[in-house]
Amino acid sequence: MAPPSLKKIAYHTLQQGKTLAGLAHKELSKKLMEVLAPGVAPENFPINQDLIKEVRRSMENLENIDWREAEAGVYPKSQLFEAPWLEWAKKYPLVWLDMPQTWQRRKKNKTREIPKIVNEEDYPEYYLQNFHHQTDGYLSDHSAEIYDLQVEILFNGTADSMRRRVLSPLKRGLKKYLSEGSKKIKVLDIATGTGRTLQQIQSALPQVELYGLDLSGSYLKQASKYLSSRSGDLVQLTKGNAEKMPYASASFKALTCVFLFHELPRDARQNVLNECFRLLEPGGILVLADSIQIEDSPKFTPIMENFHKIFHEPYYRDYIVDNINLRLEKSGFSSITSESHFMTKVWKANKPV
């Protein structure tokens, strides 16, 4: 067996460093919370040593598949190291400064502290709240600026690795159309947020025409900032609700959607899937990624329950028992498959020809 390359060693070292940094941040913030805001932390389900070992194994498996797919050319190896480190370092103090507000919000069970300048009539009721107890919910520049860093800390440096799990099924689903090379292939990323998934798709599939949709103008501004600094064609970003998207029917060859469904009520999940079916051309592909569910990852049930308890995620508990396969079928999709990687589950489905 050949020894690992320097790049592979660098990648695994980077991932281990991010994991340790995430764990250290959580441990320190927990101790500070116990001193400065006693009684805020909810009572959690215990995590035993066997589960900790299972989590470590799952993270290692995620790292290994992430490296293998980069080595196989699913995406460039450079993407494994791509992150705005200097910018995140500058923003890291903002994460700490934001914590006292988060603790007080959690202590007082305040979940609807939205900026006063927001016109609430422009958004669905379920969106107007402080998901994760974060300041301003998804409705301010401040929230958008620190979101990616917060998510990296939350998942101990695996957020981008989990997002990348949509790339392989996306490329497989588009292989036929890419080889034809007839017309520009249009791909839409739904609930694109700060555009991290769009950046990954752009790197893996530079020949496609990319679109992004999100309900938050602040997050779209952040996405525009990141994406405009990259080479390649401009990405067309639009503000809109995924339940009623402002595009013509059958106008996209592929759709992606990452980490949206656990923050939607049941009816909204079905509405979004119905819209996805409408927007796809016959033969088009939907790749959906979100949290694992109890059905496919029963060992991780205490972690899922703790996530629901610690963070304000009002629809998460319903999501982890929801039958997404059935919802996809109800919308008209076929050839439905799913697989799980660490804390992320990925579905692939086609619109019949």
Image (cartoon, rainbow, N blue to C red):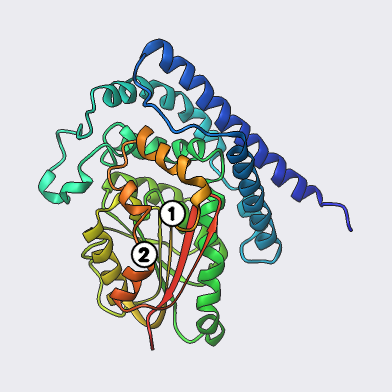
**Which residue in the rendered view is the most extreme toward the top?**
35
Above-or-below relation of 230 to 189: above
N-terminal of the two: label 1 or label 2?
A: 1
Foreground: 237 or 285? 285
- Say if 343 sits above or below 188 in the image: above
Work out which quarter of the rendered image holds the N terminus and state it.
Answer: bottom right
Which corner quadrant of the image does residue 328 belong to?
Answer: bottom left
Give me the residue at 14% from left, 33% from top.
116
Q: Which mark is residue 293?
A: 1
In the picture of the structure, the residue carrying the numbered disc 2 is: 324
Name the outermost residue toward the left: 121
Q: Amino acid at mark 1?
A: Gln
Could you classify mark 2 by the number of other residues whose Cα lies within 10 Å: few (under 14), some (14-19), or many (20 or more)?
Answer: many
Where disc 1 sits, the SS reads: loop
Q: Whole-percent x and y of residue 101?
A: 31, 22
Q: What's the residue type where badge 2 is placed?
A: Ile
Which label was assigned to residue 159? none
* Residue 17 in sight in this render: yes
